[in-house]
Amino acid sequence: MQRNIILIGFMGTGKSTIGRNLSRASGCTLIDTDNLLEEQEGCAISQIFAQKGEDSFRDLETRALRELTQHQGHVIATGGGIIGREENRQLLRQLGYVVWLIAKPSEILKRTARNNSRPLLNHKDPEKTIRELLEQRTPLYRETAHLEIETDHLSFEEVTAGIIESARYHFGSQAEQE
Ligand code: S3P
């Protein structure tokens, strides 16, 4: 396993914010797969969905994860649907210590309602989609993660400190086994 910290979790669970905090606190560079794809494609995620469709977006995510297997010592924040493919789940675990950020559906709804940059929720009934996708994806997040964190009652600083502490322990015990 490589020595990166990878954040997975549903839209609006704080992956980008926690990613930035982790990067600052640990000195590790942050890579956000959504930003990476936007840079590579030269347009916003919503345009990739609109022009190429979701399947092509998922292909781009898989390609990005394969490229990231060349990286060490990074914090990697991922898009909420990246765990959908079996290949991606394997790549994520190969990349490093995988942390699943969890939030209540009501909190997710509140946070994602702040902007309309997420094509999957950009319609009349985002709450229904959130519930359905959470049901489909929860077992996949669980299967992929080394650590799960319920974020509802914690500050971003507390979540960040918890992740750094457990990653240190995880990589320490991994080094002992090598
Ligand atoms: C998606 C989540 C988004 C982005 C895209 C699809 C999803 O990322 O990758 O809109 O399928 O859950 P965030 O989780 O960072 O919002």
Image (tube, grey):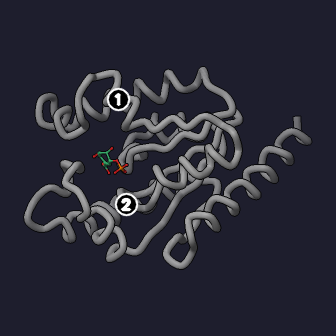
Q: Nearer the viewer, residue 37 or 67?
A: 37
Q: Residues within 10 Å of mark 2 (few under 14, many from 20)?
A: many
At label 1, which amino acid type do we have? Leu
Question: Cβ of disc 2 within 8 Å of ligand 1?
Answer: yes
Q: Which residue is the site of mark 2?
A: 12
Of the 4 image quadrants, the one containing the N terminus is top right
Whole-Å distance between the Cαs marked 1 and 2? 19 Å
Going by the image, does 52 lie left or right of 59?
A: left
| Local SS, label 1 | helix
Going by the image, does 20 lie left or right of 88?
A: right
Instruction: Name above or below for residue 133 compared with residue 33.
Output: below
> Residue 9 placed where, x, y %?
45, 56
> Residue 131 placed where, x, y %?
28, 69
| Local SS, label 2 | loop
At label 2, which amino acid type do we have? Gly
Q: Which residue is the site of mark 1?
A: 37
Of the 4 image quadrants, the one containing the C terminus is top right
What residue is drawn where x is 25% and y is 37%? 45
> Residue 71 placed where, x, y %?
62, 25
Question: Cβ of disc 1 within 8 Å of ligand 1?
Answer: yes
Going by the image, does 66 lie left or right of 175?
A: left
> If you read the primary sequence from the N terminus, does the residue marked by circle 1 or circle 2 appear first?
2
Dot 1 and dot 2 residues touching (CB under 8 Å): no
Instruction: Name above or below for residue 142 compared with residue 104.
Output: above
Instruction: Name above or below for residue 118 compared with residue 129.
Output: above
